[in-house]
Image (cartoon, rainbow, N blue to C red):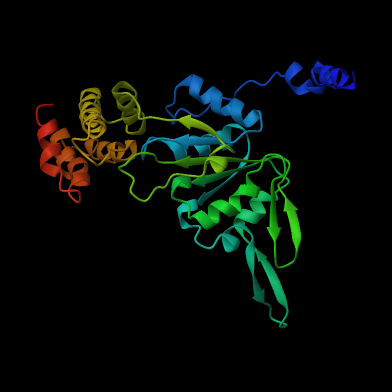
Amino acid sequence: MQSNKTTASLLQPDLFPDFRTASFSPPKHSRDLCIPQRKWEFLCHTLYLGKYPFLLGPKGCGKSSVAMELADAMEMDYFGFDMGQAFKPKKMFVGGLVIGDEGKTLAVRSEFFKAFTSDRPTLIFLDELTRIPMVAANFLMTILDRRQSYLYDEDSGVRYNKGTNVQFVAAGNTGFAYVSTQRLDSAFEDRFIKVQLDYLTPEEEAALMMQRYPLVKASAAAQLAEIARLLRQAEQKEALTVSLSTRQVLDAAAYLQLGYSVREVVEEVILTNYVIAGEQLVARSLVQMV
């Protein structure tokens, strides 16, 4: 009988007042960010619910930009860290000890530690999470635990809890083209809400080029965006192993406003991305008719 009462009490709506009275409206992002509106709203709601988004997608599709826009729109302090460089996790996440001027041992806290324990609304961006060394991934298990998120300083024997309004967003690449990435432990992945991001459509990418560089003509932007689409399509079909990022397309568009032709910027900026892989001739043959 007691069990039935307990079950009934768990179902009482009073236990979830935040959801009964939720009136959160996702803030708008800047005009510089091109992302489907529903995807943006989903990311904002994910943070609002206290969960951590894990942005997955090819390189240069805007993951870092999305993270910074989320922090700005949600009025949070932003701190970004490259997890691929976390070879000394204790030093990165906690800090270290130094000898002071008077010969005393002093604890020097890392930037991550200061962000993690902040009393201000803070968004910590864990970039390149799919490249994280396993020793650092183990360190993050307690940091990312949404029930008891903390850092343990073994030197002082003190546990430091996460700031109340500190949240995380992560980003990583997936696919065989990214040889330095690794499969993450499923318990580690479960700490995130996985969100798939992709490249812009040719129309969106052309519009972004003209927004960033107003002197670029619409016809040239459309032609460059179509070339990018063809090269990405070839990579998806495994005719190429190198993926073309939006960042690289924007780099090429910057030269268009200086009077360079589409053909020139494709040759000098786009196709050179395929030289190291030995695929420049294949890439050139795919776009020569555009």
Q: Residue at x 48, y 52 (%)?
A: 132
- The part of the image, by quadrant, that contains residue 280 is top left
- Position above or below: 119 against 250: below
Q: Up-down: is 211 above or below 145? A: above
Quadrant of res 208: top left
- For the point 54% across and 55% down, the residue is 136
Q: Residue furthest right?
A: 2
User: How many discs mark residues in the rendered view?
Assistant: 0
Name the foreground residue: 195 vs 274: 195
Horizontal arrangement in the rendering, residue 99 relative to residue 18 (left or right): left
Instruction: Report if residue 21 is visible in the image.
Output: no
Screen quadrant of the C terminus: top left
Q: Position of residue 177 (x, y in %)?
A: 30, 43
> Left of 8 or right of it: where is 167?
left
Where in the figure is residue 91, as x and y percent of width and height?
58, 63
Q: Residue at x 73, y 54 (%)?
A: 160
Report the quarter where the N terminus lies.
top right
Q: Is residue 6 visible?
A: yes
Residue beneath the point at 18% across and 35% down: 239
The x and y percentages for residue 227 are 20, 30
Residue 173 x/y as whole percent: 40, 41
Q: Is residue 122 shown above or below 236?
A: below
Which residue lies most toward the front here?
Answer: 1
